[in-house]
């Protein structure tokens, strides 16, 4: 899995650079002191403060463990706006816009810049703030559907609980693919297997379920970046014709990634990557949304610089399987808020996940 990080979280601090331009991140207020609206000592405006100022988070809908202070968010936003002679609402919306553009840029690097049509994908948004920005990010990235999983604020924690024990091992080879023979690769894989087993330190534990696999980091000669090409065989088995097999797999992946291919260029192997994965007991996690009864609210939400829109804030617990709703609305739960802009529809799937559909004109 390829991971790209951008500094655009809820704690990302908004600031004015030497040229008088508004910037967001990468500096963050973190959890402590956190955004100004947390009331824990933070004074600089953050993405979360902008969301509060624009009405997307209400005191009554926030985490029960934290008392929200909208007045402090307003103070932080107003003070920064006065430095650039800008209306506070425009500044707050600008903070959200910059955060959205930063996230959308990361999405485009994984789609358009790699030859993938964003309309073929669904954006999955999780975390405490992800569902708040998901529709705007999708619209700017050209994606037409957004999926919000059950309990998105706890999505990463659930992933940690269900993760397997994994060790990665690498060794640089740096040789033309044609010079990588069976004996050399077999020696490397055997050494990797032993070192990974010693590192795991569980020799006495059953090997049942253990999965060992390897891949070659390859590129055309003269290029800088590599593609990780996994073996088509099971476990650490080596194909009969190494060069022909990995050349075919490399060309298929290269063509898929970049849309073109020079079949006359020589390929080289930069390194071999070996992964050892042991399954761990996985807790049974149901798809049921949990939490206490939350009130339905109404608040004025600013989606642009026009007048605020009276918007319902609906507890996710109140949604019914199969129900279809239309924005604007904010769906909230313990740990997350899902913002549904005007003209966006949301459907509750069988497992309780939310599938939001953007109108075509927004997904450009």
Image (cartoon, grey):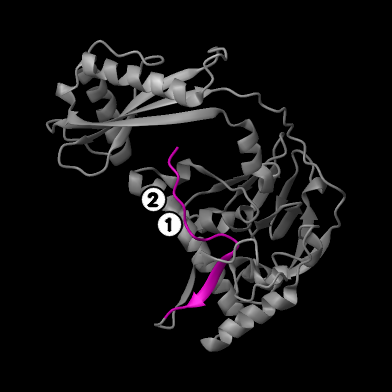
Q: Is residue 301 at least partly visible in the picture?
A: no
Residue at horizontal 66%, vertical 51%? 345
Residue at horizontal 22%, vertical 14%? 183
Dot 1 corresponds to which residue?
A: 105
Residue at horizontal 76%, vertical 66%? 58
Residue 248 in the image: state x and y as whole percent: 25, 23
Residue 175 in the image: state x and y as whole percent: 17, 30
Q: Residues within 10 Å of mark 1 (few under 14, many from 20)?
A: some
Residue 229 in the image: state x and y as whole percent: 32, 28
Q: Does residue 3 sit above or below 20 in this rendering?
A: above
Residue interval drawn in magenta: 1-17
Residue at horizontal 68%, vertical 75%? 73
Taking 62 as reference, is 168 left or right? left
List the single residue furthest toward the left. 264
Residue 170 position by quadrant: top left
Residue 130 bears which disc, if any?
none
Dot 2 corresponds to which residue?
A: 109
Are the two marked residues, 1 and 2, in contact with CB atoms closer than 8 angstroms?
A: yes
From the image, which quarter does the N terminus lie in? top left
Q: Main secondary structure of the magenta part?
A: loop
Front in this rendered view, residue 284 or 262: 284
Front in this rendered view, residue 259 or 202: 202
């Amino acid at each position: 899995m390829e991971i790209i990080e951008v500094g655009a979280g809820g704690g990302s601090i908004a600031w004015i650079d030497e040229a008088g331009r508004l910037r967001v991140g990468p500096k963050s207020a973190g959890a402590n002191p956190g955004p100004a609206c947390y009331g824990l000592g933070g004074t600089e405006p953050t993405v979360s403060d902008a969301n509060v100022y624009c009405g997307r988070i209400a005191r009554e809908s926030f985490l029960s463990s934290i008392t929200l202070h909208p007045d402090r968010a307003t103070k932080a936003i107003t003070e920064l706006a006065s430095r650039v002679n800008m209306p506070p609402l425009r500044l707050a919306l600008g903070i959200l816009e910059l955060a959205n553009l930063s996230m959308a840029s990361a999405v485009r690097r994984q789609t358009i810049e790699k030859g993938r049509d964003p309309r073929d994908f669904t954006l999955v948004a999780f975390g405490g703030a992800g569902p708040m920005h998901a529709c705007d990010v999708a619209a700017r990235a050209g994606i037409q559907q957004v999926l919000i999983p059950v309990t998105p604020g706890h999505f990463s924690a659930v992933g940690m609980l269900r993760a397997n024990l994994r060790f990665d091992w690498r060794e640089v080879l740096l040789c033309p693919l044609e010079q990588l023979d069976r004996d050399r690769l077999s020696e490397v894989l055997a050494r990797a297997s032993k070192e990974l087993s010693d590192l795991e330190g569980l020799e006495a534990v059953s090997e049942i379920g253990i999965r060992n696999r390897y891949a070659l980091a390859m590129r055309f000669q003269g290029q800088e970046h590599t593609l990780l090409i996994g073996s088509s065989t099971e476990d650490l088995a080596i194909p009969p014709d190494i060069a022909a097999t990995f050349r075919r797999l490399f060309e298929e992946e290269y063509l898929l990634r970049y849309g073109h291919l020079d079949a006359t260029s020589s390929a080289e192997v930069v390194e071999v990557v070996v992964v050892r994965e042991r399954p761990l007991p996985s807790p049974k996690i149901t798809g049921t949304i949990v939490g206490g009864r939350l009130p339905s609210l109404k608040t004025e939400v600013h989606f642009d610089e026009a007048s605020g829109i009276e918007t319902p804030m609906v507890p996710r617990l109140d949604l019914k399987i199969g129900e279809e709703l239309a924005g604007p609305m904010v769906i909230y739960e313990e740990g997350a808020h899902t913002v549904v802009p005007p003209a966006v529809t949301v459907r509750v799937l069988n497992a309780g996940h939310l599938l939001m559909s953007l109108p075509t004109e927004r997904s450009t």
